[in-house]
Amino acid sequence: MIKFLKHKKFWLPLIIITIILVTVELLLRLNLYNGFVKPDSYLGNSFERVKALNNFGKDKIQWITVGDSRVDWGIDHKKLRHIRKENGINHLRMSFRGASFMAIQATIDWSIENMDSLEGVLVGVSEDKISHRHSYNELYNIAWPFKNYLNFHDYNSILIDKKQWRFYYSLALVTFYKDIKNFISNPVDRYMEIKKFGSKETAKVFDYKRANSSNLCSFRLDSIESCIKTAEIFKKSGQEQAGFRLPVKLCSTYLAKRRSKTNSPVAPVIDKKSIVDAWQHLIEHVLNSGKKFYLLLLPDHEMYNYMIKPSNSAEITEQIILKFQDHPNFLLIDLRNLIKPNQHCKFYSDTLHFNNKGIDLITKETIRFFNQNTQ
């Protein structure tokens, strides 16, 4: 056995494989594959945004919008940009679907470092987003261009993963693996996607509006009981209804039925202090950098309120805000109660995202706050 381990037939293939992997890792980190990434993927979306920023001119940007899909798909970015432009302010979209706290943090820090004219940051989140802890899942796919600004030293407590996995997820090979596999399986389709997306103008990247006219008013989701019944109907029919995948998944579990009997919400967030500290530290960092921090609190759908949202989400949010309520460069744009629970179905395309009617309402109220509080 020892002789075999010493023989080149054993160690030579390992050395060759290691050299190949290290070479590929370096090539990916040198951005040589970036132009082949699927444009509408997490990675592609980030790369295209940075490309559009470079074309626009990073030194010309005064404000950015940051957050996950709730604000990325929930605001008419074109309307917001044009209204702000009338006041001489370039306000651009830097929100990304799937963005966790750490992706938001890295995007903000990267922007502060690279945008010389940056005056303020609009962070759009909901109480549910604030109070939930996040994992490494999709973090590097979304924040790869900003990976050097991921500050695990100050914000690591927001993550639930064990520290030893951080190096694994940070590898380019791990981050790009799925995209490369998909590209190899069908390079022709990838080429057509890249060609089609390549025709987009810089303004269109920042003026994104996710048009969706559907709503949830044909579904009963106003209570645990009604959600369970609706989930059972869809499961029996075997039909996948648009906007109802998440409710079926959540409301058909044993946990949902147990909650309906006890009428109890989800358990409070574990280690509340780490979440409060992380958000407060991020806000302080932006304010201490001489920038303004506007926190846009979006409504949560009623189903989220009783199925997913931690019962102490409001307490966590208020504790974060309290520290900055008198700071001249901090503004709370509180839209949490903008939509009444019995009206939710009219403004949502699914239980997480707004439809056209919801987008118009959120955009209108956001612009109103800006007009009232900024020059």
Image: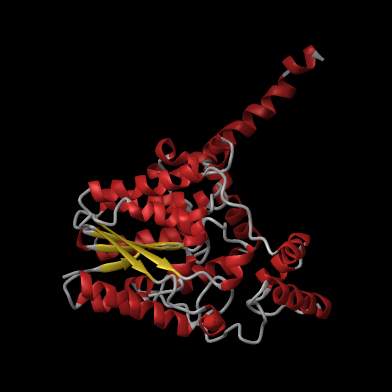
Position of residue 156 relative to residue 332, above or below, is: above
Q: Position of residue 139 (x, y in %)?
A: 51, 50
Q: Is residue 294 above or below residue 354?
A: above
Q: How many marks?
A: 0
Q: How is the image coloured?
A: secondary structure
- Give the residue drawn at x 39%, y 42%: 148
Which quadrant of the figure has residue 91? bottom left
Residue in view at x 47 percent, y 84 percent: 356
Does residue 189 appear in the picture of this structure? yes
Q: Nearer the viewer, residue 13 or 88?
A: 88
Residue at 30%, 47% in the rendered image: 284
Residue 143 seen in render:
no
Q: Residue furthest top?
A: 2
Residue 338, percent from left and from top:
42, 77
Residue 179 lies, with reference to residue 219, above or below; the image says above
Q: Quadrant of the N terminus?
A: top right
* Residue 40 coordinates in the image, percent (x, y): 51, 67
Going by the picture, which residue comes out furthest to the front? 262
Q: Is residue 364 left or right of residue 129?
A: left
| Residue 89 location (% of width, % of height) | 20, 69
Quarter the C terminus occupies: bottom left
Q: Nearer the viewer, residue 307 or 142?
A: 307
Looking at the image, residue 325 sits to the left or right of residue 12; the answer is left
Closer to us: 109 or 342: 342
Task: Give the left or right position of residue 156, taking residue 180 as reference.
Answer: left
